[in-house]
Image: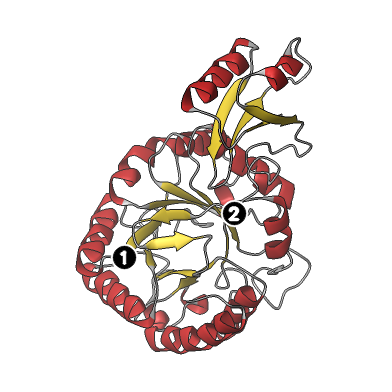
Amino acid sequence: MIVVMKRSATEEQLQHLVEHVEALGLKANVLRGTERTVVAAIGDERVNGVRSLESAPGVDNVMPVLAPYKLASREAHEETSVVRAGSLELGGKSIGVIAGPCSVESEEQIVATAKAVKAAGATALRGGAFKPRTSPYSFQGMKEEGLKLLAKAREETGLAIVTEVVSPEDVPLVSEYADVLQIGARNMQNYRLLEACGKANAAVLLKRGPSATVDELLLAAEYILDGGNGRVILCERGIRTFESHVRFTLPLTTVPYLQQKTHLPVVVDPSHGTGHTNLVPAMARAGIAAGADGLIVEVHPDPENAKSDGYQTLSCDAFEAMMGQCRRIADAMDRTL
């Protein structure tokens, strides 16, 4: 259930309530908004004495949460959360753009890409150092050396780093280099990984699994939030359907639907969502028109010779052209890019 504090509630009253909640055997999560502070009491709401929370000093209202995802729900946090990580900001009036190659291949490649995407207006650099691939014979990434090259690109450009983490054991290492930990579609329901990212200091970008429902995505986010990490970003990257003309089907209705259900920012991945370079700009524009808080796009200086996902990757020039188009859409939506 959600306990809404009065605007005049003191820090002492808030701490008293937290202790009261925990004394009932529930877990207390404090969510601070610009207008109100609420306490999410997680656990069996049928416990004896739970109604006594209504009479605690500083309490304005106590109400049950109907959604199974307690902390991700707008019932728990009415205002849209703004997630900040270095140069990246998502959830506010401005639209964040994360761009870069599928895989880090060399210092020259990643630094050149970082400079190009920043010049075009990107606010964060993506790049895979650890790559979970369908085939064991595909390029698996440069691992820690790739992380070091991403850090070098950040030094050169100031762009925040978004990179994938594939196992719980790697979270501490990747967190040393990354501003945002990406949990890929294959790992959306890797619960040990979700729990580990819930304890990390970095923000987390959680991609929807190719066969996952929206509720399953939100419950996966709940694992991270429940671990204490409130900086969670949701990503619609396409789902598997009967269609064969695209790599995945990109359901952009997910964007406004999620924004009704959760306070977490939502980004769209038009690269994986289509699997075809020539379709990426159109779906990026459509994502912004649908209200997305950000985009994550694959960009490479030489897509034809990229070690992974070249068929869905934009060149630096094509990315710059796409950004110009997207700015016009953002302007029409009263947002900035």
Rendered-image quadrant of the N terminus: top right
Q: Quadrant of residue 200?
A: top left
Please tell me whether residue 319 is drawn above or below residue 27 in the rendered image.
below
**Please, what secondary structure does the residue beneath circle 2 have?**
loop
Please tell me whether residue 302 is drawn above or below residue 29 in the rendered image.
below
Please tell me whether residue 261 is drawn above or below residue 100 in the rendered image.
above
295, 245: nearer the viewer: 295
Which x, y percent locates residue 37? Answer: 57, 37
Look at label 1 and name its amino acid: Leu
Badge 1 or badge 2: first in the primary sequence:
2
Say left or right for 113 vs 219: left
Say left or right for 308 vs 331: left
Report the residue marked by disc 2.
80
- Residue at 30 percent across and 67 percent down: it is 105
- Residue at 58 percent across and 20 percent down: it is 17
Please tell me whether residue 114 is drawn above or below residue 281 in the rendered image.
above
**Please, what secondary structure does the residue beneath circle 1 have?**
loop
Give the Cα separation between the discs numbered 1 and 2.
Answer: 24 Å
- Residue at 54 percent across and 75 percent down: it is 335
Report the residue marked by disc 1.
159
Give the total number of marks visible in the rendering: 2
Marker disc for residue 176:
none
Residue 149 shows up from this direction:
yes
Task: Count neighbours of disc 2 (C-alpha within 10 A) and say few if under 14, some if 14 to 19, many if 20 or more.
Answer: some
Residue at the front extreme?
8
47, 6: nearer the viewer: 6
Which x, y percent locates residue 174? Answer: 34, 46
Look at label 2 and name its amino acid: Thr
